[in-house]
Image: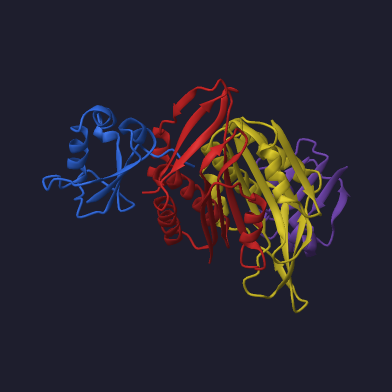
Chain colours: A blue, B red, C yellow, D purple
């Protein structure tokens, strides 16, 4: 099981702050995950319509689309940051 | 090295943080600070709501501070970032850096702000005075461009 | 535009100056500050004596502030420079800048410090703890190089 | 009459904080003045031994060696600034 957490408009669009998910083995990279989530339809289709705009953190460390998920226990998905 | 990273809902005391950076020592020659405030030029903003990723926010700011310490000989670093509801005129973020010399303190504060903006997991949503949702603040290309100066 | 330039023997209140830069308004999004302190790493400095050219010091700082205002859209600028005897750990100079946006506030503070250092008529003499005269502090090429960045 | 004012180690070497002087008409520029003062001997010779290190302000405005004195009423001579 992997914990997926969503923030800001990604959270609003998917309609969830977090969930436990079992990812299929073919979802190997961050990029794979974004396409997989988009295919879940409805709010997910909308949130991940442009996967290149979504940022991902694996166990609280920023990751790139080509990075392997490598057994991360908490995967966060969110828009570009606007703090500061 | 005096180091303090805080992510909190409460306001903070800018003066006390700047004071602490040089207090009780005579090796600090320069203290730079940056305060980010909630701005409302149009008069239509009731508040910003700052969402953050608890746990990662602190960790990411710590990584940015580590990067600054690797580049400049700092004697003190303070970073405070608030979350929650923040009204126009209120403080959002504070960076304080201290060093023996001016260039290190100023450059490090500038660097820290650039990477807080683009790397720390915080998001701003606008709430309007008419009660409507003003939407999420969009990230700016200009912020990425500023951060890219340090490569 | 809130503008304040002061040349004085007395200490100043950094907190109050930073507070004033954004107080009672909601168009300020960024406040940057720089404090220069009297440093004594070796433990041999009793005090710095800051000599200045009365009349020209204020006028020259005003010219430097005018130059900053011509380059950046600032909403507030404060420059305070002390003269007289200043002991290790004490404040010498303060620059505070406020703007709608971060880059303007930070760059203007950096610019103001560079030109205060190289253009404002102040000179530092060292008095040592053993009672001897440590001589006049020499101007640094690095300060000229930093100021030349803005051409 | 012109008021000459001296600061920092220039003041210490010439042994004066200020003086009233009548400058000869051939002293036309800032550079001329530095050479003229150096020729006054003793402390002046020492203070202005390397005229290129001395900064000059005409009526409280920084000037360059080639600038004409142009009737300035107060001329200040001092080392490079070390404030801030």
Image quarter in which the N terminus of chain C is found: top right
- The percent coordinates of residue A18 (x first, y second) are 32, 43
Residue nearer the viewer, B142 or A9: A9
- In the displayed structure, does residue C109 sit left or right of residue B67? right
Location of residue D50 by image quarter: bottom right
Location of residue C78 by image quarter: top right
Residue ID at (24%, 34%): A51
Residue ID at (50%, 53%): B108
Residue nearer the viewer, C57 or C106: C106
Residue nearer the viewer, D7 or C94: C94
Q: Is residue D41 visible?
A: no
Furthest-bottom residue in this view: C130
**Location of residue A51 with respect to C149 vertically, above or below:** above
- The percent coordinates of residue B50 (x first, y second) are 49, 39
Q: Is residue B94 visible?
A: yes
**Location of residue C86 with respect to D65 vertically, above or below:** below
**Location of residue B44 with respect to D19 vertically, above or below:** above
Location of residue C60 by image quarter: top right
- In the displayed structure, does residue B115 sit left or right of residue D16? left
């Amino acid at each position: 099981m992997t914990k997926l957490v969503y923030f800001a408009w990604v959270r609003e669009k998917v309609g969830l702050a977090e969930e436990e998910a079992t990812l299929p083995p073919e979802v190997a990279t961050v990029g794979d995950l974004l396409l997989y989530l988009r295919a879940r339809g409805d709010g997910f289709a909308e949130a991940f319509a442009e996967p290149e705009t979504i940022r991902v953190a694996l166990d609280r460390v920023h990751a790139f689309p080509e990075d392997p998920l490598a057994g991360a226990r908490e995967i966060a998905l969110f828009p570009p940051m606007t703090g500061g | 090295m005096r180091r303090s990273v805080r992510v909190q809902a409460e306001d903070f005391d800018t003066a006390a943080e700047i004071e602490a950076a040089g207090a009780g020592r005579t090796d600090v020659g320069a203290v730079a600070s940056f305060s980010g405030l909630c701005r409302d030029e149009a008069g239509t903003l009731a508040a910003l709501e700052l969402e953050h990723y608890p746990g990662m926010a602190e960790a990411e700011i710590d990584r940015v501070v580590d990067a600054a310490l690797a580049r400049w000989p700092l004697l003190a670093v303070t970073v405070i970032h608030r979350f929650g509801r923040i009204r126009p005129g209120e403080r959002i973020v504070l960076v304080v850096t201290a060093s023996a010399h001016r260039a290190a303190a100023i450059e490090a504060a500038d660097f820290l702000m650039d990477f807080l903006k683009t790397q720390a997991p915080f998001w701003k949503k606008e709430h309007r005075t008419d009660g409507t949702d003003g939407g999420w603040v969009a990230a700016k290309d200009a912020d990425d461009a500023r951060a890219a100066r340090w490569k």
